[in-house]
Structures are given as C-alpha cells and as structure tokens.
Image (cartoon, coloured by chain):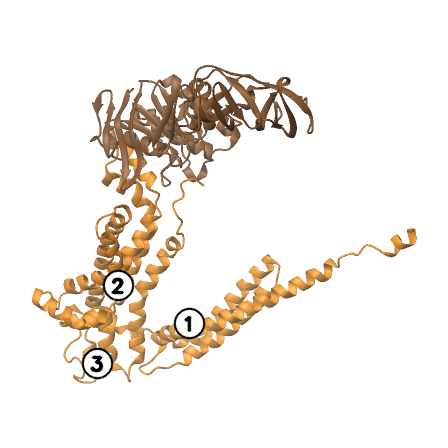
Chain colours: A brown, B orange
Amino acid sequence: MSRIELHSVAKRWGDVTAVEPTDLVIRNGEFVAILGPSGCGKSTTLFMLAGIYTPTEGQILFDQAAVNDVEARDRNVGIVFQSYALYPHMTVRENIGFPLRFKRVSREEGRRRAEEAARLVQVQELMDRKPAQLSGGQQQRVALARALVKEPGLLLLDEPLSNLDASLRLVMRSEIRGLQRKLGVTTILVTHDQIEATTMADRVICMRRGRIEQIGTAEDLYHRPDSLFVAGFIGSPPINLFKGQASNGNVVVGEAILATSRDASGDVVLGIRPEAVRLGEGPFTGRVEDREPHGRETIYHLATPLGLLRALEPGAVARFSVGDLLPFAVSASLLFDAGTERRISGGALEVPH
Amino acid sequence: MDVALAASAPETTDWERLAARSRLRRRTTTALLYTVLLLGSLPIVVPYLWLFTVALSGRVGASTFVLWRTLAVLLPALLIWSILRVGIDDRRRLRVCEIVLVIVTFVALAVLTGPYLHTGNWRFLWNANIADQLKGAAGVGGTYPSVWTAFGNSLFLAITQMVLVAAVSTLAGYYLSRFDFRGRGGYLKGLLVLHAFPAMTLIIPIFLLLHWVGLLDTLTGVILVVVALELPFAIFVMKGFFDAVPWDIEMSAMTDGASRRQAFLLVVLPQVKVGMLAVAVFAFLRGWEEYVFVRTLLLQKSNWTMSLYLFWMSADVMGTDYAMVSAIGVFYVLPSIILYTMCQKYLTQMTLGGIKG
C-alpha cells in the first residue's frame, strides 16, 4: 500500500513534451482516475509510475522515498495494459503465476496464490486454457489476476474497459471497484471515458496536452469545473456553450440579454448543462427543432434567443413534439472568460431583461 | 385488368440447368488446373526421377529404360487419377478408386522395373577404395577419402553453420528490433547491401585472409566465411519476427519482476520460435550444399565435404559410370529432404503471436 507523490515530473521525447512538470499526491488506498482525450499524456504518466519510462525531470516518490532509479521489476507495481499483454504461449495458470516466479515462493505457495487470484476475478475454471481461447472479458480478468497476484503496492490500469462491449463494461466497472475496495490497494486508472472515471474513482485528475487541468471528486468537476475544457469534457450529453459579451452586469448571448451578479467583462462563454433546463415554464421561449428519445429520458434541440440549446427531459414520456413553442427556465449555469477559458465564479445568472 | 395480370406469369428459374452449368464449369476449371500443374511439374520431377531410377538400376552407363518404364506407369496413373478427381463427386467412391489405382500402379512398377533394381551403384558406401576401380591416376590421383568422412565433414559444417547463424541472428535481430542506437539506420542499410553483394567476387581476398590467419584448409575457416555470408539475411528475418512481437508483453514481463534477459528468454523468444526454425533450416541447407568456398578453401582430401566428393568423383568417372554418380547424388540429397520434410509442418505454421483473438 503506497502513497504516491510526483514532484515536478515531466517527460520529453526530444522536442516534444508529453508531460509538463506536474505535481501530484495520491493517498494510500485511494482510487484515482486520470481522465483526458487521446495524447494528453495520461498513459505516459502511468508508465512513468510503473518504471517503464524514466522521467526527464522531477522525482517520483513511493511512501516518501524517491524511486526514479528503481527498476520496474523492483517497484512492486501491478499493471494491466490496454491490450492485456497476456503471454500467448502460456496457459492462464502460468500467466497468473508468472510474477511469482521472481519472488521467493515455494511451488505450492505459488500455485495456491495463483488459484486465489484466479478466484478473486472468477476465472478459476479457465486455468488450463491459452489466452487465444478466452473472450475479451476473460482475458481482462486474467490480466487483472496477474497484476494482483503479487499483492502490489500500486495497481495501474491503462484503459482497461475500452476494448469490452457495453454490457461487459458495466459489469467490470463494478467488479473492479469492488475489488479495489476489498483489497484497499492504491489504484490509478487511465481512461478517456468520463463515465468510467466518475463512477469508479474517488478522485478524478483531468489532463489535457500534458498538463493537469483540474483535480477533484466527480462532483467537484461537474459542479465547479475550473475551465471550459473540463466543463465540456465532463457530463453526457455535453454542456451547451454559447459565446457572449459581458459588461456592467449584463451578458449579451445571441439575441438575449441576461443580468448577472458575476464580475465579468469582455468576451465570455456561457455554459448551460442540458439537465439544468426546466421545460414548460420560465422566462425564456424556445421552439423544438428536433427530438431524441432515449428511453428513460428525451433530449430536445431547441431554437432559442441564446442559440441552439440541447435540453434533457427526464421521464419516459416525451411531453413535447417537433415544432412546439414552449417556455423554459435555466436552473444553473456556468460563465467562463473566453480568453483564459477559466470559470468566473460567484454570483448567479439572473433572468433576462 | 385481370387478363393483363394473368398474362405476366411468374418466371421460374431453371435450377437444374444452372446446376448442370456450374458443374460443367467446375469440372473444366479443375481439369485445366490439373493439366497445368502436371505439365508444370514434369520438368521438375523428371530429372529427380532420372536420378533415383538410375541410382537404383543403372549399370555403368546411364541406362534410362527403367526411367521410361517408370514414367510409362506413372504418367497414365496420374492422368487417370486426375480424371477420377474431376469426374467423380462422391467422396467414398473416389477414395476407393484412388486406392485401387495406387495398388495397380505399385504392382505395375514392381513387375516392370523390379527385376532391374540393384544396389551395385551404392558400393561407395562400404568400399572406400573406389580409386582402385577407376581408370588410372587421372583426376585427383591417389586414394579417395571414405564417403563417410566427407559426409561427416558436411554434417559438421552444416550443423555448426546452423547453430552459429541461429544464435547470432536471433540476438542481433532482437537488439535491432528493440533498441534505437546511433548508426542503426546505417547498419540496416549496410546489411541489405551485404546481402545483395555477390560473394564470389571476394574469393581471392578471403583466400588470402584465411591464409594469413592460418585457417586455410580448415573447416573452421570455411564455417566462419559461410556464416558471415549467411548472417545479413538471417538478421533481417529475425528482426522482422521480433518486430511482430508486441512491446507490451515484454514490459509486462519486466513489471512482473523479470530482468531484461529473463523477459527475453521466457516471453519474447517463444514468440519467434518459428522464425528461428526457418533461419536454422536455411542455414543448415546452405552449409550442406556449399560448394564454391569449400572448393577454394579446402585442399586436403580428408577435409572434403560431400559436395567436393561428388565433384571429384564425377570428374573422374564421368563418361563411364553415371550410375554411381547418381547414387552419390541421391545419398547427398537425402538428408536435405529428410530435414525439410520434418520441419515443413512447423515452417508452414507461421502464426503471428496473437495477444487478443
């Protein structure tokens, strides 16, 4: 069980900076997700923690000890790669037992621990098969068992669910979460899927282009995104964003003029989440241009004075049809400075003039 | 209205006619295929058949009538077999007909050629003093070495070649595939150039070099030279195989606790087994059939390889005893055939190490 710290850790490949100097603290037993689009440096950070890459700058500390020079095999880290990286010429039993070959364990103990790890992920019936004879989900579980069999201080998962189909993803999400809670091992998950990150992790680290945009719980990132990028990345369906002008307590967005108590001036971006729109009553009016039924909710595309607004209506019954003119209100909104892309906090957006 | 509808009766497809047409098309294509294959294989197979039949039946001269008899039996048999394959659809009946055909062919061969087969041409195997029976001291002069000495030398050359090439090319291929070092690009280009280079032009410098080093007229010298010439291609092949092994299973092994060397031996090497086998077999065959360099660099008779034995023997007896030369030829080619037949299954099973499905 390890407490992980990164002090100004950066990774450069020649002229390209994959990870900017980064500081990070991950507490013992925490489940952290590194979330971001492709190429943002999340996998690179993961591999630096595993010891596969060496940081160009900075120090990595495990339990307050610098481990930059410690080789991957001595770091007691378990890693599950995106492709699972199972050894094709070995059976499942041999795959899971592989890490134990390099520890001082007797044959029987090795076998026992491999069986235990297999039972933990429910692959005990598949022990004599080769990886090519397993389904994707089974392969992933074997990879997980192999990472856990050595009782690592740190568990690293590189996009573990991205190659699974939707229903299997749901199952594995809760299984991995449950495993982590049961074993209490410090876990770092890398993903581009924000739902994975928000549902599984204690804290989410949002990265973009080698830099950390924001760290916080899922609620922090949802309700109080520090930047436009985070607001746009978190939340499905994505947040509505409108360009506007702010001056003297007013914000002009599209054809609407809104009063605000937030301290803003110049070019701004207004963000309204689809679920923050109350349909049926309110100071704004919009016409339904399109309707997407999703089963337990409906998404409307409304033409409004602000612009084209996506609104989410919960409930299985869609109350409105295409062409309807209806009033709506906005229960919560976010305002960002267009230049710095940072959120302008404090105050509220009032009703229009 | 009703009349108009009734007049346009629904067209039925004539399935029978279509099926018959497909069958005819299939038979024609198969027949053509068999014809082309048979005609194409004849120029390749007949010389070997000549070799085998003369080795087993010839007396001093190159008596080919056994060959003609063999062909007279085999060609009609093949023709009948092709017709059977094209004409008969029922699998059981086809199998029965094929077995009957094979039995008849064997019987015919036995009857027509049996009486003429003998092992006299193989006397070189147990009679080392062939020279006594040759005409005078022409050619090399003096005694020949035993064919088994030559066989042993060839075997030594080929096996050492195989082991050295496999070992060096595997390690070199791994390093080239995995590590980026200064001069790597130039090295790879250099390998290509070396492979394309005609080794024959280097004969004289190599002779001198070996003489200065003191390895002239030794099998060791020849081995070193032939290994060096075979390596560029082998390294390229092995590098290709290592490139196909995903890097993440290596990293996985190293995170699991293996050192680089252990990861290489336990995880990476098993993935390129097929490549190693291919390189080893090709190296063996190259060493086994090596002629130019052994001819130039080996002088003593006791150092002869099979290729030299065959050459000098045929130089001495050519014009009089084709039969024995053919027998030596068959003896020479047998190990290659055996090796290749044994390894064929593995060589054709080249699968790329699949990690997920």
The residue at the point 52 percent across, 69 percent down is B104
Q: What is the C-alpha distance between the residues marked 3 and 2?
A: 49 Å
Task: Tell me which label, 1 or 2, sits earlier in the chain.
Answer: 1
Q: Residue at x 45, y 18 (%)?
A: A219
Mark 1 or mark 3, which is nearer the start of the sequence?
Answer: 1
Q: Do labels 3 and 2 share a chain?
A: yes
Callout 1, which amino acid? Val
State the SS at label 1. Answer: helix
> On the image, numbered disc 1 is attached to which residue?
B45
Residue labelled with disc 2? B193
Residue A123 badge: none
| Distance between mark 1 and mark 2 Cα atoms | 35 Å
Residue receiving disc 3? B133
Q: Nearer the viewer, residue A321 or A188?
A: A321
Chain letter behind tag 2: B
* Mark nearer the viewer, 3 or 2: 2
B69 lies above or below B181 = below
In the displayed structure image, the side of residue A117 where residue A242 appears, left or right:
right
Q: Residues within 10 Å of mark 3 (few under 14, many from 20)?
A: few
The image shows residue B139 at horizontal and vertical percentages of 18, 82
N-term-proximal mark, 3 vs 2: 3
Residue A315 visible: no
